[in-house]
Amino acid sequence: MAKSEFETPEIKRIPEIPPVRIGSMAHSQPFRAKPEHQAPLGFPGELVDDWKQVALDKMGELLGKYRSLQVFMDACVKCGACTDKCHYYLGTSDPKNMPVARQDLMRSVYRRYFTVAGKYLPKLVGAVDLTEEVVEDWYRYYHQCSECRRCSVYCPYGIDTAEITMAGREILDAIGVGQKYANEIIGKVFKIGNNLGLPEPALKDTLEGLEEEVEEDIEVPVKFPLDEAGADVLLVTPSADFFAEPHVDGLIGYAKVFHQAGISWTLSSHASEAANFGLFIGSYQNMQKVAMRIREAALELGVKRIVVGECGHAWRVAYSFWNTLVGPFDFLDPNYPVPQHICEFTHDLLKRGALRLDPSANDDKVVTFHDSCNVSRASRMGDFPGGQFVIPRELIRAACNRFVDMEPGTTHEATYCCGGGGGLLTDDLVELRVKGALPRVQALSRVIEDDGVTHMAAICAICKSQFTKVLPYYGLGMDMIVSVHQLIGDALVFDEH
Amino acid sequence: MALEINGKTYETDEEGYLANLSDWDEEVARKMAELDDCDLTDNHWEVINFLREYYEEYQIAPAVRVLTKAIGKKLGKDKGNSKYLYQLFPYGPAKQACKYAGLPKPTGCV
């Protein structure tokens, strides 16, 4: 826990695109997975002997399997539209963090081995041999992309950098070069059921404690049911909601909503995690295995609906992948969205008049909202385009009298990543996380200055943990960041049923 | 990596967390705190001891609200909150206190 050995970027009122500083983040890389972290995921424990052939075979396999990857390798025309769109480039100035350059780490190898020109005239087409040095660069820079896909919004060809990063990480895992943080966590889900490694007795104890706490606080017997067969709703939520602040106040908010709406619900000790780091490492098999626990829990408990708590990439996996990954979910009630986001759930209740909020309960706050990347650019909420932007904001406005949006260009589909997404929320990458948060912090600072914003609400466990950690580097309070459902829970009026 | 205390070697991971929970003794906590320029007071020890007791029962560090509640009971209600715990452990109670207590680092989105 050494004191920070890097400089926190300066906040500029008018954001600047920094001049390049070659190699300024070449030292940044996460801890490597040990054999015991690799084994449960089916990856070799250390660099395999014939790593080059294995890597190229894997690349060939992915190019064949994912047509998108093939297109992304071929389609880039180096127009430069993406160069100033990545929060990691804006925060670090390292030109390899320009999305095009990060993609080119793979593209140049692709050209060398998979195109005619690259096979015979490599120098002419910027093709390079796959060497150990290249592998090292992949490991460094494919762990300086949070797979947030902001650059893709601006790419005229729609090249999805996240998919290239995922492919890069998948190839690295295949040759035995894994990332400790993500792979250790996936192993914990297989063994215990959640990212934290929170065993059932501890989860039970934690939930009982919360029941006591809430009852003491508001004198309403709000329950936090666990493994209750026959409940209508299974709630799957990031395990950080059980463990950390400000997440836990969001969980309390969900429980209050269920209580007041009179809808029976349950958490599951088997599926005590919504997050799915299989997505981050590009491993379909591991993503499937993680998600399968949710299907199993839903069947086992006999629920009619599945609601997903505040977790960005979990919602992407649920909304965009579940049906083909672990579906069909034809055993659930088709009258409700399958799956349903907790924000959709609460929004629907509010619209139907089933809940009443008193926004004056949050009059001590001026609130802004951080759109999470995976919710904004990889999913939707509600039954209309843009619902993922409208619904959380309507919830906040219903719960707070004072809401201010940050600068356009930093919100909605143009939102900046918090700086810790995509499997990078680990202390060994704290420099990257602090620097990558710069664009969001700049936009936040502006509404603090101009509009007196006191709090930023989010609907993602990673965003919440990331901001709690990095805001103090910029001189802002870690308690600025709140869960949307904390605001709801605090404003909820408990009428007699 | 390893920690050397009075000629005895304690194996640790890349971030200085003890590799084997059973290796822990009070000297380990003191040494780790010393490396962070942190003086361990009785109140720090209350937290460290609670973490160890909880871990022994549940094989996981306590959730923040479990911890703040327990510390509030032991040290007084005004201290049963994370603000106070951050005063004691500025790098974050979940991580810094776990480290001194010899517990593995909490993983996940925390």
Image (spheres, grey):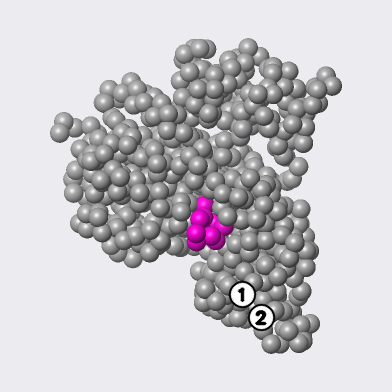
Query: Viewed as shown, does residue A419 lie left or right of A96?
Result: left
Residue A81: % across, % down: 59, 73
Asked if labels 2 and 1 touch by Cβ distance under 8 angstroms, the answer is yes
Q: Amino acid at mark 2?
A: Phe
What is the residue that sits farthest to the right in this orientation? B7
Give the labeled residue for mark 2. Answer: A114
Tag 2 secondary structure: helix
The answer to whether residue A374 of the structure is visible from this angle is yes
Residue at 67% x, 76% y is A110
Decide: is A262 above or below A283: above
Q: Quadrant of the C terminus of chain A?
A: top left
- The residue lying toward the viewer, choosing from A210 and A408, is A210
Residues in magenta? A277-286
Chain under disc 1: A
- Residue A314 horizontal side relative to residue A302, left or right: right
Quarter residue A103 falls in: bottom right
Give SS at disc 1: helix
Quick check: B37 above or below B107?
A: above
Whether A491 is drawn above or below A134: the answer is above
Judge from the rendering whether residue A144 lies leftward or rightward of residue A415; answer left or right.
right
Residue denoted by label 1: A60
User: Residue farthest to the left?
Assistant: A497
Q: Residue at x 51, y 39 (%)?
A: A196
Residues beneath discs 1 and 2 located on the same chain: yes
Q: Residue at x 48, y 39 (%)?
A: A192
Inter-mark Cα distance, 1 to 2? 8 Å
Q: Work out whether residue A367 or residue A42 is closer to the camera in this orientation and state it.
A: A42
Q: How many marks?
A: 2
Q: Name the spot of residue A162 as percent of width and height, x first.
A: 55, 64
Q: Chain of mark 2?
A: A
In percent of the image, x 53 and y 48: which residue is there? A186
> Disc 1 marks which amino acid?
Gly
